[in-house]
Image (tube, rainbow, N blue to C red):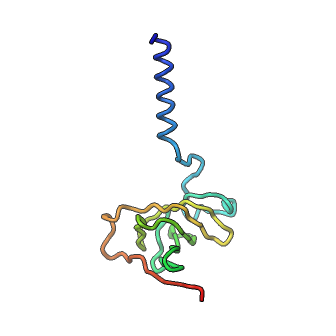
């Protein structure tokens, strides 16, 4: 292989590695605090950081949906999450970041929730409460 082809192959390989490595990263989705949410964000995908408000964390609909309030101390937003809960380590009073759609009723329907490592939780935190709400 001549030098020119080797150089083209090297650049192509680097480009493929960059595309694969950056796949799925939402570059246009700025991280917001709860108080930074405005009417401008309604109907759009948002990434919001805050703290799970104490006394607001519940499972609904036979555990298929998790609801809670996310706060930054100045503003609150309700969060509804229906998805894989096997690795969901939500604890009241701890930090969480949610990705989802911001709705007009001040609710984020989250498709992803990111929390701290469970080993960093304090022992006085309140774990997820289960409430079964079934339609009769």
Residue placed most toward the observer, 28 or 63: 63
Q: Is residue 95 left or right of residue 43?
A: left
Residue 80, x across and y down, in percent: 56, 71
Furthest residue toward top: 2
Give the tally of numbered discs.
0
Q: Is residue 10 left or right of residue 31?
A: left
Residue placed most toward the observer, 118 or 72: 118
- Dividing the picture into quadrants, the one containing residue 39 is bottom right
Quadrant position of the N terminus in the picture: top left
Quadrant position of the C terminus in the picture: bottom right
Q: Relative to 73, is 1 above or below? A: above
Residue 72, x across and y down, in percent: 51, 67
Q: Relative to 89, is 12 above or below? A: above
Residue 56, x across and y down, in percent: 49, 78
Identity of the residue drawn at 47% across and 17% down: 7
Identity of the residue drawn at 49% across and 15% down: 5
Identity of the residue drawn at 47% across and 29% down: 14
Identity of the residue drawn at 48% across and 74% down: 53
Residue placed most toward the observer, 8 or 136: 136
Residue 134, x across and y down, in percent: 55, 85
Q: Is residue 102 left or right of residue 19?
A: right
Q: Is residue 56 left or right of residue 39?
A: left
């Amino acid at each position: 292989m001549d030098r020119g082809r080797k150089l083209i192959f090297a650049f192509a390989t680097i480009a493929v590695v960059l595309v694969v490595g950056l796949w799925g990263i939402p570059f246009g989705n700025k991280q917001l605090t709860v108080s930074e949410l405005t009417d401008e964000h309604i109907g759009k995908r948002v990434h919001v950081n805050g703290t799970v408000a104490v006394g607001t964390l519940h499972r609904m609909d036979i555990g298929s949906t998790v609801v809670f309030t996310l706060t930054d101390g100045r503003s609150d937003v309700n969060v509804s999450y229906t998805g894989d809960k096997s690795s969901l380590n939500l604890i009241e009073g701890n930090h969480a970041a949610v990705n989802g759609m911001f709705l007009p009723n001040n609710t984020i329907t989250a498709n992803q929730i990111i929390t701290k490592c469970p080993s960093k939780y304090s022992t006085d935190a309140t774990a997820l409460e289960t409430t079964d709400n079934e339609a009769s």
